[in-house]
Amino acid sequence: MSDTMPRLTDLTLAEARRALDTKAISANELTRAHLERIEAKDPRIGAYLHVMGEVALEQAEAAQRRIDAGEAAPLTGIPVALKDVLCTVDAPTTAASRILEGFRPPYDATVVRRLRDEGAIFLGKANTDEFAMGSSNENSAYKPVRNPWDLSRVPGGSSGGPAAAVAARMATISLGSDTGGSIRQPAGFCGVVGLKPTYGRVSRFGLLAFASSLDQIGPFARSVEDAAMALQAIAGHDPLDSTSNPAPVPDYRAALTGDIAGLRIGIAREFTLEGMEPGVIAAFEAAVARLEALGANLVEVSLPHSGYALPTYYITAPAEASANLARYDGVKYGLSVEAGTLRESYERTRGEGFGEEVKRRIMLGTYALSSGYYDAYYVKAQKVRTLIKRDFDEAWNRVDAIVAPTSPTVAFPLGARSGDPYQMYLSDIFTVPANMAGIPGIAVPCGFSEGMPVSLQVLGPAFAEPMILRIAHAYEQSESWLARRPESAAV
């Protein structure tokens, strides 16, 4: 490695790709550097639930053979962290829940298989809120995740582990899942890039389901270019997922032109909230001014039903979770607690296996789906969801994209909201509407408040990932946030 080259764990995906292809570094060196950093730093951060050291080193040797043969794909030899809701044949998949402790799936998730086919290197399974239910990654049954920028604060959730791993230089990129903001919100809290694709753009096969009509898998990265490269590897139709869209996958990296002159960018008046932190408002307004300076035309738009997105979400998502989590009964796999009768065994297994937040959502969902309440709650929520999507559809007639803060606050202290579910749920108030509408969104760093990262969210029409990547990349390249790194993660 050259004396002038950055530390291996500081390399972005694009930089690592060039270094690997020019033989400036080897896949083995890059992998070992990340494994050593995980060993040194993760005991304080808690981003990983299972480190796949032996697997990673074997994959590194195979990746190097591909590189030496001139057959490298864009992600060949790139160290990746996988959220522990993605099935892997060679590592446990627990969804950070006691009910799946030690469970090893017999198959890979489609996104995992696609990364495997590319020659990516799996560093390990990243921590998460249990079954992806949470906004702070304090709901993991095993350990909380801490924010690399300030170890006394949360990293966001539910994909806090994948976000923290990338921010702390313990992975080059990572994969998470976004049901109501679980990629974008932790990306914002941890000062990295997080991309939620259009619903159906990336296969959900092999994702442990939370809310099937909302879940979507996407990447975390330290640059927009890296996010585009990662999305390229995992996007595309999958016959194993009935909700997968057959639309052709464009060249996402080619969309990063740096030019947004003349684009119409919407500012929705509804993406403000009483009690928003002044530093978040200031950073967002500065980001909007920068987009205008880059040649974008700012247009005020209205999304009148987005204010109902959060309550609509907290009927829809728990209802779907109630159905999806009914399969965990201790009979076929995972935790099994013996009792005198089968019913008692079910009750004890689920009672001891699920955490408090998961139980809360199962009960909310079961109630919303129960006889006499289904029409009053679930059906009404679906009607409001249609109105939310219609608002966005009307807005796209006037603008190419919409920008908003990713979260109304910066990362809050560990434990500050764990006793108040309502305040915790408000963390996702700006991210949930995109899930309800099924549209893509990307979170990109846009400043700091209280020494913590602030994030800009760019939303676009369905399958407009090239557009939101283009806008996010142009903004990112015009600022210096990409060069900032968390001091607490420094060696």
Image (cartoon, rainbow, N blue to C red):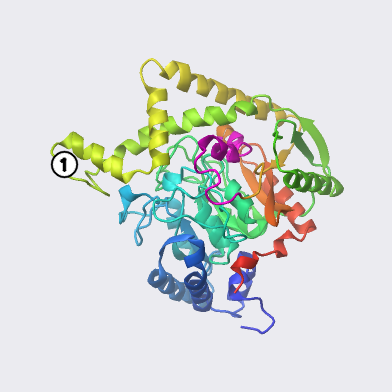
Q: Where are the magenta residues, as a range?
A: 412-435
Q: Judge by depth and name the residue closer to the eye, 442 or 162.
A: 162
With respect to residue 218, does 432 lie above or below? above
**Left or right: residue 161 compared with residue 441:** left
Q: Can you say which quadrant of the picture contains the N terminus? A: bottom right
Q: Judge by depth and name the residue closer to the eye, 245 or 476.
A: 476
Residue depicted at 71% across the width and 65% down the height: 483
For disc 1, the marked residue is: 339
| Total number of numbered discs in the rendering | 1
**Left or right: residue 60 compared with residue 264:** left
Report x, y in % for residue 367.
Answer: 39, 24
Q: Is residue 255 visible?
A: no
Q: Residues within 10 Å of mark 1 (few under 14, many from 20)?
A: few
Residue depicted at 35% across the width and 62% down the height: 90
Report x, y in % for residue 398.
Answer: 76, 30
**Left or right: residue 38 compared with residue 92:** right
Residue depicted at 41% across the width and 71% down the height: 53
**Left or right: residue 344 compared with residue 128:** left
Report x, y in % for residue 350.
Answer: 29, 40
Q: Judge by depth and name the residue closer to the eye, 243 or 426.
A: 426
Where disc 1 sits, the SS reads loop
Q: Amino acid at mark 1?
A: Ala
Q: Is residue 307 visible?
A: yes
Q: Can you say which quadrant of the picture contains the C terminus? A: bottom right
With respect to residue 310, does 147 lie above or below? below
Q: Is residue 232 magenta?
A: no
Report x, y in % for residue 25.
Answer: 58, 79
Report which quarter residue 322 is drawn in.
Answer: top left
